[in-house]
Amino acid sequence: MLWQLMWTFFKIGLFSFGGGYAMLTMIQQEVVLKHHWLTHQQLTDMIAVSQMTPGPIAINVATFIGYRQAGIWGSVFTTIGVVLPSLIIMLLITITYLKLKGKAWFNGIFKELRPLVIGLIASAAWLTAKTAFVDWFGIIVFAACFFLLLRFKIHPLLLMFFAGIAGVIAG
């Protein structure tokens, strides 16, 4: 089980581009749909907890899933699995970047990857929204938090706190 967890999250770390939120789609594919380690609702709950926990969301989700499946060692193996590809790739990219940073074609590669990353993040948001919005109250809380974040730049931690209080009050 430990090696399966590590290999699964190694693949997620290797083939997901754009950071933690972009990885959520692939995590859902592997963890919920392929291996059935979690339900959609459980993954959504872990994502919510991972957003409130310090550190990168994909690493937090991987650590929680590993712990749930195989205890402490599961969390260690999934965390190593999801981090190792990034470490290797970033070392290679840094070496390559330092050698090729003046070339126009090389800079063009990074320019064209930006829309891909936005698409991956939007896909993760859409998949999460399907299970996160269970009633009108949730939609109202989302809209209010989104507005407050964009308009008044309220700290996300404060918004999570108030959304949690609203959830307790609403029952």
Image (spheres, helix red, strand yellow):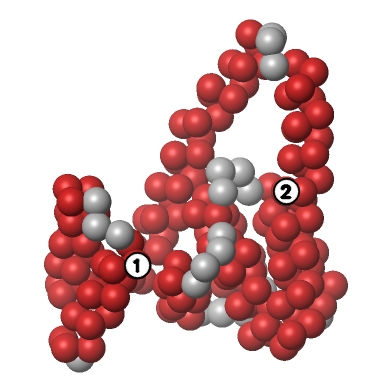
Q: Secondary structure at mark 2?
A: helix
Give the residue type at disc 2: Ser
For label 2, count other residues whose C-alpha is less than 10 Å away and answer few (under 14), some (14-19) or many (20+).
Answer: some
Residue at 49% across / 45% down in the picture?
A: 120
- Residue 88 drawn at (x, y percent): 81, 45
CA gap, disc 1 to disc 2?
Answer: 27 Å
Residue 83 sits above or below residue 140 on the image: above
Rate crowding at label 1 as few (under 14), some (14 to 19) or many (20 or more) other CA atoms within 10 Å: few
Q: Earlier in the sequence, mark 1 or mark 2?
A: 2
Q: Which quarter of the rendering shows the N terminus?
A: bottom right
Above or below, comparing residue 115 to residue 28 in the picture: above
Residue 76 vs residue 23: left or right? right
Task: Say which residue label 2 marks.
Answer: 86
In this rendering, does residue 8 appear at all? no
Residue 5 is situated, as x and y percent measured from the top left of the image, at 76, 72
What secondary structure is marked by label 1? helix
Q: Nearer the viewer, mark 1 or mark 2?
A: 1
Q: Nearer the viewer, residue 86 or 158?
A: 158
In this view of the protein, can residue 150 be seen by the observer? yes
Tell me what residue is drawn at x 80 percent, y 39 percent.
91
Q: Quadrant of residue 163?
A: bottom left
Q: Position of residue 27 (x, y in %)?
A: 59, 63
What residue sits right under mark 1 in the picture? Answer: 157
Q: Tell me the kind of residue under disc 1.
A: Leu
Q: Position of residue 41 (x, y in %)?
A: 43, 78
Q: Nearer the viewer, residue 143 or 102?
A: 102
